Amino acid sequence: MPQLQFWHFLPQFFWLAVCFITLYLVMAFVALPRIGSVLAQRREKVESDLDAAERARGDADAALAAYEASLVGAREAAHKAIGEASHAASKAAEARNHELDGEIARQIEEAGRAITASKAQAMESLSGMAADAARAATAKLVGVEVSEADARQAVEAAKDA
Amino acid sequence: MASEAHGAGGHSPLAQFEVTKMVDLQIAGLDLHITNSAIWMMAATALVIVFTTVFISRRAMVPGRMQSLVEISYEFVANMIKDNVGHEGRPYFPFIFTLFMFILACNMLGMLPFSFTVTSQVVVTFGLAFVVFIGVTIIGFIKHGLGFFKFFLPHGVPGFLAPLVIPIEVLSYLIRPVSLGLRLFANLTAGHTMLKVFAGFIVPLGAFYIIPGVIPMAAVIGLTVLEMAIAFLQAYVFAVLSCIYLHDAIHMH
Protein backbone atom coordinates (compact mmCIF):
# COMPACT_ATOMS: atom_id res chain seq x y z
CA MET A 1 0.00 0.00 0.00
CA PRO A 2 1.56 3.32 -1.06
CA GLN A 3 -0.01 5.07 1.93
CA LEU A 4 2.17 3.11 4.33
CA GLN A 5 5.54 4.13 2.90
CA PHE A 6 7.23 5.74 5.82
CA TRP A 7 9.22 8.43 4.00
CA HIS A 8 6.28 10.69 3.29
CA PHE A 9 4.77 10.61 6.80
CA LEU A 10 6.73 13.56 8.13
CA PRO A 11 6.38 15.90 5.12
CA GLN A 12 2.68 15.10 4.78
CA PHE A 13 2.05 15.70 8.45
CA PHE A 14 4.06 18.91 8.36
CA TRP A 15 2.05 20.30 5.44
CA LEU A 16 -1.17 19.07 6.98
CA ALA A 17 -0.34 21.05 10.11
CA VAL A 18 0.57 24.13 8.07
CA CYS A 19 -2.61 23.96 5.99
CA PHE A 20 -4.89 23.14 8.90
CA ILE A 21 -3.51 25.86 11.18
CA THR A 22 -3.69 28.42 8.36
CA LEU A 23 -7.25 27.42 7.60
CA TYR A 24 -8.17 27.50 11.28
CA LEU A 25 -6.76 30.99 11.76
CA VAL A 26 -8.49 32.35 8.66
CA MET A 27 -11.78 30.71 9.65
CA ALA A 28 -11.65 31.76 13.30
CA PHE A 29 -10.58 35.36 12.80
CA VAL A 30 -11.80 36.34 9.33
CA ALA A 31 -14.38 34.13 7.66
CA LEU A 32 -16.63 32.96 10.49
CA PRO A 33 -17.03 36.34 12.22
CA ARG A 34 -17.98 37.82 8.86
CA ILE A 35 -20.52 35.13 8.04
CA GLY A 36 -21.86 35.38 11.59
CA SER A 37 -22.24 39.15 11.31
CA VAL A 38 -24.05 38.84 7.97
CA LEU A 39 -26.46 36.36 9.52
CA ALA A 40 -26.94 38.50 12.64
CA GLN A 41 -27.48 41.57 10.47
CA ARG A 42 -30.15 39.75 8.50
CA ARG A 43 -31.83 38.50 11.66
CA GLU A 44 -31.87 42.05 13.05
CA LYS A 45 -33.19 43.45 9.79
CA VAL A 46 -35.96 40.88 9.64
CA GLU A 47 -36.88 41.57 13.26
CA SER A 48 -36.88 45.34 12.83
CA ASP A 49 -38.90 45.00 9.63
CA LEU A 50 -41.41 42.86 11.48
CA ASP A 51 -41.57 45.49 14.22
CA ALA A 52 -42.08 48.24 11.65
CA ALA A 53 -44.81 46.21 9.97
CA GLU A 54 -46.46 45.66 13.35
CA ARG A 55 -46.30 49.39 14.09
CA ALA A 56 -47.68 50.24 10.64
CA ARG A 57 -50.55 47.85 11.21
CA GLY A 58 -51.27 49.54 14.53
CA ASP A 59 -51.27 52.93 12.79
CA ALA A 60 -53.57 51.63 10.09
CA ASP A 61 -55.93 50.20 12.69
CA ALA A 62 -55.98 53.52 14.55
CA ALA A 63 -56.63 55.43 11.31
CA LEU A 64 -59.44 53.05 10.45
CA ALA A 65 -60.98 53.48 13.91
CA ALA A 66 -60.74 57.29 13.60
CA TYR A 67 -62.29 57.15 10.15
CA GLU A 68 -65.14 55.01 11.38
CA ALA A 69 -65.70 57.26 14.38
CA SER A 70 -65.86 60.32 12.12
CA LEU A 71 -68.20 58.44 9.81
CA VAL A 72 -70.50 57.66 12.72
CA GLY A 73 -70.33 61.33 13.84
CA ALA A 74 -71.13 62.55 10.36
CA ARG A 75 -74.02 60.13 10.07
CA GLU A 76 -75.42 61.31 13.38
CA ALA A 77 -75.06 64.96 12.38
CA ALA A 78 -76.80 64.21 9.10
CA HIS A 79 -79.63 62.44 10.91
CA LYS A 80 -80.02 65.36 13.24
CA ALA A 81 -80.04 67.86 10.37
CA ILE A 82 -82.60 65.80 8.48
CA GLY A 83 -84.75 65.50 11.61
CA GLU A 84 -84.60 69.22 12.22
CA ALA A 85 -85.40 70.09 8.63
CA SER A 86 -88.35 67.71 8.46
CA HIS A 87 -89.61 68.93 11.81
CA ALA A 88 -89.44 72.54 10.65
CA ALA A 89 -91.09 71.66 7.37
CA SER A 90 -93.94 69.80 9.06
CA LYS A 91 -94.42 72.64 11.49
CA ALA A 92 -94.60 75.13 8.63
CA ALA A 93 -97.01 72.89 6.76
CA GLU A 94 -99.18 72.60 9.84
CA ALA A 95 -99.19 76.34 10.27
CA ARG A 96 -100.22 76.84 6.67
CA ASN A 97 -102.92 74.19 6.96
CA HIS A 98 -104.22 75.93 10.01
CA GLU A 99 -104.27 79.24 8.17
CA LEU A 100 -106.01 77.72 5.16
CA ASP A 101 -108.54 76.07 7.42
CA GLY A 102 -109.38 79.47 8.93
CA GLU A 103 -109.66 81.05 5.49
CA ILE A 104 -111.89 78.27 4.21
CA ALA A 105 -114.09 78.47 7.30
CA ARG A 106 -114.40 82.19 6.80
CA GLN A 107 -115.25 81.80 3.15
CA ILE A 108 -117.81 79.10 3.97
CA GLU A 109 -119.35 81.36 6.57
CA GLU A 110 -119.45 84.28 4.11
CA ALA A 111 -120.99 82.12 1.42
CA GLY A 112 -123.53 80.83 3.92
CA ARG A 113 -124.40 84.39 4.83
CA ALA A 114 -124.76 85.35 1.17
CA ILE A 115 -126.98 82.34 0.55
CA THR A 116 -129.17 83.23 3.54
CA ALA A 117 -129.43 86.83 2.35
CA SER A 118 -130.30 85.92 -1.18
CA LYS A 119 -132.76 83.29 0.06
CA ALA A 120 -134.47 85.93 2.21
CA GLN A 121 -134.52 88.28 -0.71
CA ALA A 122 -135.97 85.57 -2.95
CA MET A 123 -138.63 84.78 -0.40
CA GLU A 124 -139.42 88.49 -0.18
CA SER A 125 -139.84 88.81 -3.90
CA LEU A 126 -141.78 85.54 -3.97
CA SER A 127 -144.27 86.96 -1.48
CA GLY A 128 -144.66 90.08 -3.66
CA MET A 129 -145.20 87.95 -6.72
CA ALA A 130 -147.66 85.71 -4.90
CA ALA A 131 -149.59 88.80 -3.72
CA ASP A 132 -149.66 90.21 -7.24
CA ALA A 133 -150.78 86.85 -8.60
CA ALA A 134 -153.46 86.61 -5.88
CA ARG A 135 -154.74 90.13 -6.69
CA ALA A 136 -154.79 89.44 -10.37
CA ALA A 137 -156.59 86.13 -9.82
CA THR A 138 -159.15 87.68 -7.50
CA ALA A 139 -159.79 90.50 -9.98
CA LYS A 140 -160.27 88.07 -12.81
CA LEU A 141 -162.34 85.51 -10.98
CA VAL A 142 -164.44 87.60 -8.59
CA GLY A 143 -163.97 91.06 -10.05
CA VAL A 144 -162.99 92.47 -6.72
CA GLU A 145 -160.10 94.72 -6.59
CA VAL A 146 -158.02 93.74 -3.54
CA SER A 147 -155.62 96.26 -2.22
CA GLU A 148 -152.02 95.40 -2.35
CA ALA A 149 -151.61 95.51 1.43
CA ASP A 150 -154.49 93.11 1.95
CA ALA A 151 -153.12 90.71 -0.60
CA ARG A 152 -149.76 90.83 1.06
CA GLN A 153 -151.29 90.21 4.41
CA ALA A 154 -153.26 87.24 3.10
CA VAL A 155 -150.06 85.75 1.53
CA GLU A 156 -148.19 86.21 4.75
CA ALA A 157 -151.00 84.51 6.62
CA ALA A 158 -151.03 81.60 4.18
CA LYS A 159 -147.26 81.30 4.39
CA ASP A 160 -147.27 81.17 8.13
CA ALA A 161 -149.97 78.47 8.21
CA MET B 1 9.67 2.41 -7.68
CA ALA B 2 7.08 5.03 -6.99
CA SER B 3 7.52 6.69 -10.35
CA GLU B 4 7.39 3.31 -12.07
CA ALA B 5 4.02 2.44 -10.60
CA HIS B 6 2.73 5.93 -11.21
CA GLY B 7 3.89 6.16 -14.80
CA ALA B 8 2.40 4.40 -17.80
CA GLY B 9 -1.14 5.33 -16.80
CA GLY B 10 -0.90 3.72 -13.35
CA HIS B 11 -2.39 0.32 -13.99
CA SER B 12 -2.55 -0.67 -10.34
CA PRO B 13 -5.76 0.57 -8.68
CA LEU B 14 -3.57 1.63 -5.76
CA ALA B 15 -1.27 3.74 -7.90
CA GLN B 16 -3.57 6.71 -7.36
CA PHE B 17 -2.53 6.80 -3.70
CA GLU B 18 1.17 7.11 -4.57
CA VAL B 19 2.77 10.13 -2.91
CA THR B 20 5.34 11.83 -5.12
CA LYS B 21 7.80 14.61 -4.36
CA MET B 22 7.08 17.79 -6.25
CA VAL B 23 9.50 20.18 -4.55
CA ASP B 24 12.48 19.09 -2.48
CA LEU B 25 12.58 20.91 0.80
CA GLN B 26 14.78 20.30 3.81
CA ILE B 27 14.47 22.40 6.93
CA ALA B 28 16.77 21.78 9.90
CA GLY B 29 17.70 18.41 8.50
CA LEU B 30 14.06 17.30 8.25
CA ASP B 31 12.56 16.15 4.97
CA LEU B 32 9.63 18.51 4.41
CA HIS B 33 9.14 17.90 0.71
CA ILE B 34 6.16 19.43 -0.93
CA THR B 35 4.43 16.34 -2.27
CA ASN B 36 1.38 16.00 -4.50
CA SER B 37 -0.52 15.35 -1.29
CA ALA B 38 0.66 18.66 0.18
CA ILE B 39 -0.33 20.48 -2.98
CA TRP B 40 -3.87 19.10 -2.82
CA MET B 41 -4.07 19.99 0.88
CA MET B 42 -3.12 23.54 -0.06
CA ALA B 43 -5.72 23.46 -2.83
CA ALA B 44 -8.37 22.36 -0.33
CA THR B 45 -7.30 25.08 2.10
CA ALA B 46 -7.43 27.70 -0.65
CA LEU B 47 -10.79 26.42 -1.83
CA VAL B 48 -12.32 26.68 1.64
CA ILE B 49 -10.84 30.14 2.20
CA VAL B 50 -12.14 31.39 -1.15
CA PHE B 51 -15.52 29.76 -0.55
CA THR B 52 -16.00 31.27 2.91
CA THR B 53 -14.62 34.74 2.23
CA VAL B 54 -15.28 35.66 -1.41
CA PHE B 55 -18.89 34.55 -1.68
CA ILE B 56 -19.90 36.32 1.53
CA SER B 57 -18.05 39.55 0.69
CA ARG B 58 -21.11 41.19 -0.89
CA ARG B 59 -22.91 40.74 2.43
CA ALA B 60 -26.20 40.67 0.55
CA MET B 61 -29.36 40.98 2.59
CA VAL B 62 -31.00 38.55 0.20
CA PRO B 63 -28.26 35.99 -0.45
CA GLY B 64 -27.47 34.64 -3.90
CA ARG B 65 -26.83 30.99 -4.62
CA MET B 66 -23.20 30.88 -3.46
CA GLN B 67 -23.73 33.10 -0.43
CA SER B 68 -26.61 30.84 0.60
CA LEU B 69 -24.30 27.87 0.36
CA VAL B 70 -21.76 29.55 2.63
CA GLU B 71 -24.47 30.46 5.13
CA ILE B 72 -25.93 26.96 5.00
CA SER B 73 -22.54 25.38 5.78
CA TYR B 74 -22.06 27.84 8.66
CA GLU B 75 -25.46 27.05 10.15
CA PHE B 76 -25.07 23.34 9.44
CA VAL B 77 -21.94 23.14 11.60
CA ALA B 78 -23.35 25.55 14.18
CA ASN B 79 -26.43 23.36 14.59
CA MET B 80 -24.26 20.24 14.70
CA ILE B 81 -22.40 21.68 17.67
CA LYS B 82 -25.56 22.96 19.34
CA ASP B 83 -27.23 19.54 19.05
CA ASN B 84 -24.23 17.41 20.02
CA VAL B 85 -22.24 19.54 22.45
CA GLY B 86 -24.69 22.16 23.62
CA HIS B 87 -24.09 25.77 24.49
CA GLU B 88 -20.62 25.07 25.94
CA GLY B 89 -19.45 23.92 22.51
CA ARG B 90 -19.58 27.45 21.14
CA PRO B 91 -15.83 28.21 21.58
CA TYR B 92 -14.94 25.11 19.54
CA PHE B 93 -17.11 26.11 16.60
CA PRO B 94 -14.21 27.45 14.47
CA PHE B 95 -12.24 24.26 15.02
CA ILE B 96 -15.12 21.92 14.12
CA PHE B 97 -15.99 24.11 11.15
CA THR B 98 -12.39 24.04 9.93
CA LEU B 99 -12.25 20.27 10.41
CA PHE B 100 -15.50 19.67 8.55
CA MET B 101 -14.75 22.02 5.67
CA PHE B 102 -11.17 20.80 5.27
CA ILE B 103 -12.16 17.13 5.11
CA LEU B 104 -15.12 17.91 2.86
CA ALA B 105 -12.92 19.93 0.49
CA CYS B 106 -10.25 17.19 0.40
CA ASN B 107 -12.87 14.52 -0.24
CA MET B 108 -14.57 16.54 -2.98
CA LEU B 109 -11.31 17.52 -4.68
CA GLY B 110 -10.49 13.81 -4.65
CA MET B 111 -13.53 13.22 -6.83
CA LEU B 112 -11.99 15.25 -9.66
CA PRO B 113 -10.41 13.12 -12.38
CA PHE B 114 -6.59 12.93 -12.14
CA SER B 115 -6.66 14.51 -8.71
CA PHE B 116 -5.22 13.16 -5.48
CA THR B 117 -7.33 12.23 -2.49
CA VAL B 118 -5.58 13.62 0.57
CA THR B 119 -7.99 11.91 2.97
CA SER B 120 -6.98 8.50 1.66
CA GLN B 121 -3.61 9.00 3.35
CA VAL B 122 -3.20 7.30 6.71
CA VAL B 123 -0.98 10.05 8.06
CA VAL B 124 -3.52 12.72 7.24
CA THR B 125 -6.58 11.02 8.71
CA PHE B 126 -4.73 9.75 11.79
CA GLY B 127 -3.10 13.15 12.18
CA LEU B 128 -6.51 14.83 12.27
CA ALA B 129 -7.95 12.11 14.51
CA PHE B 130 -5.12 12.45 17.03
CA VAL B 131 -5.39 16.23 17.03
CA VAL B 132 -9.06 15.81 17.96
CA PHE B 133 -8.29 13.09 20.52
CA ILE B 134 -5.46 14.95 22.25
CA GLY B 135 -7.33 18.24 22.16
CA VAL B 136 -10.48 16.71 23.61
CA THR B 137 -8.52 14.97 26.37
CA ILE B 138 -6.78 18.22 27.29
CA ILE B 139 -10.16 20.00 27.39
CA GLY B 140 -11.48 17.23 29.65
CA PHE B 141 -8.63 17.64 32.13
CA ILE B 142 -8.89 21.43 32.05
CA LYS B 143 -12.63 21.31 32.77
CA HIS B 144 -12.60 18.57 35.40
CA GLY B 145 -9.02 18.30 36.61
CA LEU B 146 -8.16 14.84 37.87
CA GLY B 147 -11.89 14.24 38.17
CA PHE B 148 -11.80 13.49 34.46
CA PHE B 149 -10.50 10.02 35.38
CA LYS B 150 -13.97 9.30 36.77
CA PHE B 151 -14.97 9.18 33.13
CA PHE B 152 -13.58 5.63 33.05
CA LEU B 153 -15.88 4.44 35.83
CA PRO B 154 -19.42 5.35 34.77
CA HIS B 155 -21.79 6.45 37.48
CA GLY B 156 -23.77 3.66 39.17
CA VAL B 157 -21.40 0.81 38.36
CA PRO B 158 -20.94 -1.44 41.43
CA GLY B 159 -17.47 -1.31 42.96
CA PHE B 160 -16.58 -4.95 42.41
CA LEU B 161 -17.04 -4.48 38.67
CA ALA B 162 -14.49 -1.67 38.57
CA PRO B 163 -11.49 -3.91 37.72
CA LEU B 164 -13.44 -5.10 34.70
CA VAL B 165 -15.10 -1.86 33.64
CA ILE B 166 -12.14 0.48 33.93
CA PRO B 167 -9.85 -1.37 31.49
CA ILE B 168 -12.72 -1.66 29.00
CA GLU B 169 -13.52 2.04 29.28
CA VAL B 170 -9.86 3.04 29.00
CA LEU B 171 -9.39 0.81 25.99
CA SER B 172 -12.53 2.11 24.31
CA TYR B 173 -11.37 5.66 24.98
CA LEU B 174 -7.91 5.02 23.56
CA ILE B 175 -9.31 3.27 20.50
CA ARG B 176 -11.34 6.37 19.54
CA PRO B 177 -8.67 8.14 17.47
CA VAL B 178 -7.83 4.89 15.70
CA SER B 179 -11.42 4.23 14.71
CA LEU B 180 -11.90 7.89 13.80
CA GLY B 181 -8.84 8.02 11.56
CA LEU B 182 -9.27 4.54 10.17
CA ARG B 183 -12.90 5.10 9.19
CA LEU B 184 -12.11 8.10 7.01
CA PHE B 185 -8.99 6.51 5.51
CA ALA B 186 -10.70 3.17 4.80
CA ASN B 187 -13.84 4.69 3.28
CA LEU B 188 -11.97 6.94 0.92
CA THR B 189 -9.34 4.36 -0.03
CA ALA B 190 -11.86 1.59 -0.61
CA GLY B 191 -14.18 3.81 -2.60
CA HIS B 192 -11.49 5.18 -4.87
CA THR B 193 -9.92 1.76 -5.36
CA MET B 194 -13.29 0.33 -6.33
CA LEU B 195 -13.87 3.17 -8.81
CA LYS B 196 -10.47 2.51 -10.36
CA VAL B 197 -11.06 -1.25 -10.58
CA PHE B 198 -14.39 -0.83 -12.32
CA ALA B 199 -13.02 1.90 -14.56
CA GLY B 200 -10.20 -0.47 -15.51
CA PHE B 201 -12.74 -2.91 -16.93
CA ILE B 202 -14.35 -0.44 -19.30
CA VAL B 203 -11.74 -0.20 -22.03
CA PRO B 204 -10.56 -3.88 -22.09
CA LEU B 205 -14.15 -5.11 -22.27
CA GLY B 206 -15.41 -2.34 -24.52
CA ALA B 207 -12.58 -2.87 -27.01
CA PHE B 208 -13.97 -6.26 -27.99
CA TYR B 209 -17.64 -6.14 -27.15
CA ILE B 210 -19.47 -2.84 -26.89
CA ILE B 211 -22.21 -4.08 -24.54
CA PRO B 212 -20.03 -5.57 -21.75
CA GLY B 213 -17.98 -2.39 -21.65
CA VAL B 214 -21.15 -0.43 -20.96
CA ILE B 215 -21.84 -2.41 -17.78
CA PRO B 216 -18.73 -1.34 -15.82
CA MET B 217 -19.23 2.16 -17.24
CA ALA B 218 -22.71 2.27 -15.69
CA ALA B 219 -21.27 0.87 -12.47
CA VAL B 220 -18.62 3.60 -12.42
CA ILE B 221 -21.25 6.30 -12.94
CA GLY B 222 -23.34 4.88 -10.10
CA LEU B 223 -20.28 4.52 -7.87
CA THR B 224 -19.24 8.09 -8.60
CA VAL B 225 -22.58 9.32 -7.29
CA LEU B 226 -22.17 7.05 -4.27
CA GLU B 227 -18.65 8.34 -3.68
CA MET B 228 -19.92 11.92 -3.77
CA ALA B 229 -22.36 11.01 -1.02
CA ILE B 230 -19.62 9.23 0.95
CA ALA B 231 -17.31 12.23 0.52
CA PHE B 232 -19.89 14.39 2.27
CA LEU B 233 -21.00 11.75 4.74
CA GLN B 234 -17.51 10.92 5.98
CA ALA B 235 -16.71 14.59 6.55
CA TYR B 236 -19.97 14.84 8.47
CA VAL B 237 -19.28 11.68 10.49
CA PHE B 238 -15.80 12.86 11.38
CA ALA B 239 -17.14 16.22 12.56
CA VAL B 240 -20.07 14.70 14.47
CA LEU B 241 -17.87 12.18 16.26
CA SER B 242 -15.49 14.98 17.19
CA CYS B 243 -18.50 16.85 18.60
CA ILE B 244 -19.56 13.79 20.59
CA TYR B 245 -16.05 13.33 22.02
CA LEU B 246 -16.06 17.01 22.88
CA HIS B 247 -19.41 16.57 24.60
CA ASP B 248 -18.00 13.69 26.66
CA ALA B 249 -15.02 15.81 27.70
CA ILE B 250 -17.20 18.76 28.70
CA HIS B 251 -20.15 16.95 30.28
CA MET B 252 -18.61 13.57 31.30
CA HIS B 253 -21.21 11.27 29.70
Image (cartoon, coloured by chain):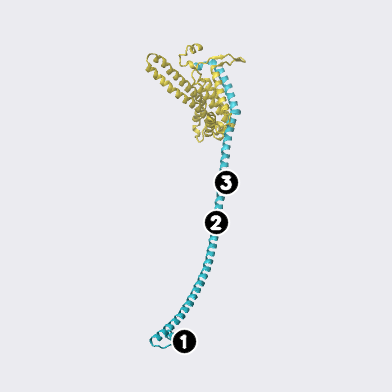
Chain colours: A cyan, B yellow
Give the image location of residue A160, x and y in percent: 43, 85
The chain identifier of the residue carrying mark 1 reads: A
- In the displayed structure, would residue B206 be above or below residue B70? above
Residue under label 1, please give it.
A149
Q: Which one is closest to the eye, mark 2 or mark 1?
A: 1
- Amino acid type at circle 3 is Asp
The chain identifier of the residue carrying mark 2 reads: A
- Amino acid type at circle 2 is Ala
Residue B141 in sight: no
- Amino acid type at circle 1 is Ala
The chain identifier of the residue carrying mark 3 reads: A
Which residue does the image show at 56% across and 52% down from the upper left?
A: A70
How packed is label 3: few (under 14 Cα within 10 Å), some, or many (20 or more)? few
Which residue does the image show at 57% across and 19% down from the upper left?
A: A15
**Tag 2's secondary structure?**
helix
Q: Which one is closest to the eye, mark 3 or mark 2?
A: 2
* Residue nearest the viewer, comparing B8 with A11: B8
Residue under label 3, please give it.
A59
How packed is label 1: few (under 14 Cα within 10 Å), some, or many (20 or more)? few
Give the image location of residue A12, x and y in percent: 55, 18
Q: Earlier in the sequence, mark 2 or mark 1?
A: 2
Which residue does the image show at 52% across and 22% down from the upper left?
A: B106
Residue under label 2, please give it.
A78
As drawn, the residue found furthest toward the right would be B28
Measured in 3D between alpha carbons, the distance from the residue under mark 3 to the one under mark 2, in whole angstroms, is 28 Å
Q: Image quadrant for the C terminus of chain A? A: bottom left
**Tag 1's secondary structure?**
helix
